[in-house]
């Protein structure tokens, strides 16, 4: 019996499948089996699957049942104690299995381990943006309420845990992995993270994640399953339900923004604020809005970003949002403007536009003066107004701080 079963669903990705299998063959951990599930492909996948000669690689073919159905077929055929899922168009670093297996073997009370990831383009070139976050096991379920933040192939999970919660929901056509992790965590399982970047996620212009309407419909189906439908007054919903729906609406907003539909994007952001107003007091909300329609894998690339134009558009939309909002939402107006200006200042700083960066930072403090107490804001102000050398010296005088997600730090 192998230690790890790698499930490789493939639908019309014959051109990528050899590379995915090669990533498995190149693993420094050798106690694995790979199950390639051809989900009714109409391209050359059967011919490619017949070329795999390593006895650890099995090829099975089924009628098209969708991504969840293909993964579930692989799970049913799997013999390993642990499961990993590598979609045919994605890749791993050579130490993925070794690192994750070592962690799971050492932590008996942990059900799964999640790595960080990078983005690659159609040619396999690594892009600027990276993915994932390091979240402590005790906080993992809470962070998961905000949406999936790692790809399915960045995880190694105990097979018995996956089977015990019912495997992948075949009624979902996207975010099916998020639903699985939510079920696993709600059953009391713990998930650990590792800071190693070991998964590579391929960005494609026609991937499911680029269809904002389809992603939204599936998010709503997942949340209805876990928290009930979004009916009635949100004040009557559970706190976790309000928060989860608000983040889902925000994700839909950002999806439409990336598709070049800002009107729909801002309507969904307004709905997010109505459901759970604190989402409009978060820095990451406005940082993402400031990136505009930059696609996944390229978001945060300031070289290709018109910060001034994006900023003017975002500030105009914010003004409209708060003008039509209720009293509870309007109470967050100052902190929202402060974070919006702060996000623009961060981007201008990253772009080397120190003059505009200083201007945005001054406006941020005028809108929300108490944000100067945040260590990341103070450091950035020192750098912008006193220079990098002094800021660097002051940073070294302080105890080294653990790097936190953007929502909690402006480092």
Image (cartoon, grey):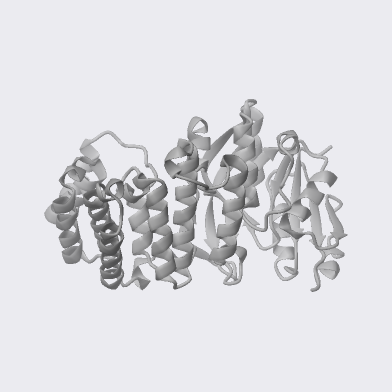
Q: Tell me the residue at 44%/67% (across/down).
A: 264
Residue 237: x and y, percent?
A: 48, 39
Q: Residue furthest top?
A: 109
User: In the figure, 401 relative to 379: above or below?
Assistant: above
Residue 35 or residue 162, whichever sits in front: 162
Residue 303's image quarter? Answer: bottom left
Query: Would you say residue 178 is visible in this rendering?
Result: no
Residue 227's image quarter? Answer: top right
Residue 313: x and y, percent?
A: 29, 70
Residue 85: x and y, percent?
A: 69, 50
Q: Is residue 150 left or right of residue 183?
A: left
Residue 145 or residue 390, whichever sits in front: 145
Q: Tell me the residue at 69%/57% (across/down).
A: 87
Residue 313 or residue 122, whichever sits in front: 313
Q: Is residue 343 left or right of residue 168?
A: left
Total labels: the figure holds: 0
Residue 3: x and y, percent?
A: 76, 37
Q: Is residue 366 left or right of residue 226?
A: left
Q: Tell me the residue at 44%/61% (across/down).
A: 254
Q: Is residue 299 left or right of residue 187?
A: left
Q: Quadrant of the N terminus?
A: top right
User: In the figure, 180 relative to 14: above or below?
Assistant: above
Query: Would you say residue 193 is visible in this rendering?
Result: yes
Residue 143 or residue 16, whichever sits in front: 143
Residue 257's image quarter? Answer: bottom left
């Amino acid at each position: 019996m192998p230690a790890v079963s790698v499930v490789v669903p493939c639908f019309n990705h014959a051109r990528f499948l050899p590379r995915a299998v090669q990533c498995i063959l190149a693993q420094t951990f050798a106690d694995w089996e790979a199950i390639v599930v051809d989900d009714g492909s109409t391209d050359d996948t059967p011919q490619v699957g017949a070329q795999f000669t390593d006895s650890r690689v099995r090829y099975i073919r089924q009628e098209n049942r969708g991504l969840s159905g293909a993964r579930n077929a692989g799970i049913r055929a799997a013999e390993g104690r642990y499961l990993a899922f590598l979609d045919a168009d994605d890749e791993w670093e050579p130490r993925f299995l070794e690192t994750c297996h070592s962690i799971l073997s050492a932590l008996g009370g942990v059900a799964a381990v999640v790595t960080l990831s990078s983005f690659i383009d159609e040619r396999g070139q690594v892009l600027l943006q990276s993915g994932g976050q390091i979240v402590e096991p005790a906080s993992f379920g809470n962070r998961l309420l905000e949406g999936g933040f790692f790809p399915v192939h960045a995880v190694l999970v105990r097979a018995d845990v996956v089977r015990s919660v019912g495997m992948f929901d075949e009624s979902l056509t996207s975010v099916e992995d998020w639903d699985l992790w939510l079920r696993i965590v709600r059953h009391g399982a713990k998930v650990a993270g590792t800071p190693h970047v070991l998964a590579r996620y391929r960005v494609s212009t026609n991937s499911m994640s680029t269809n904002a309407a389809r992603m939204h419909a599936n998010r709503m189906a997942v949340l209805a399953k876990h928290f009930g439908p979004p009916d009635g007054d949100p004040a009557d919903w559970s706190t976790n339900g309000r928060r989860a729906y608000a983040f889902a609406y925000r994700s839909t907003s950002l999806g439409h923004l990336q598709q070049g539909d800002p009107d729909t994007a801002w309507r969904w952001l307004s709905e997010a604020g109505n459901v759970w107003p604190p989402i409009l007091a978060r820095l990451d909300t406005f940082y993402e809005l400031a990136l505009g329609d930059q696609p996944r894998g390229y978001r945060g690339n300031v070289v290709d970003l018109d910060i001034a134009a994006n900023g003017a558009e975002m500030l105009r939309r914010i003004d409209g949002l708060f003008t039509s909002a209720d009293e509870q939402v309007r109470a967050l107006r100052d902190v929202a403007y402060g974070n919006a200006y702060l996000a623009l200042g961060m981007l201008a700083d990253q772009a080397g536009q120190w003059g505009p960066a200083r201007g945005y930072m001054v406006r941020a403090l005028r809108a929300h003066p108490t944000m100067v107490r945040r260590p990341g804001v103070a450091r950035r102000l020192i750098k912008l107004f006193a220079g990098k050398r002094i800021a660097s010296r002051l940073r070294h005088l302080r105890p080294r701080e653990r790097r936190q997600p953007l929502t909690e730090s402006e480092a």
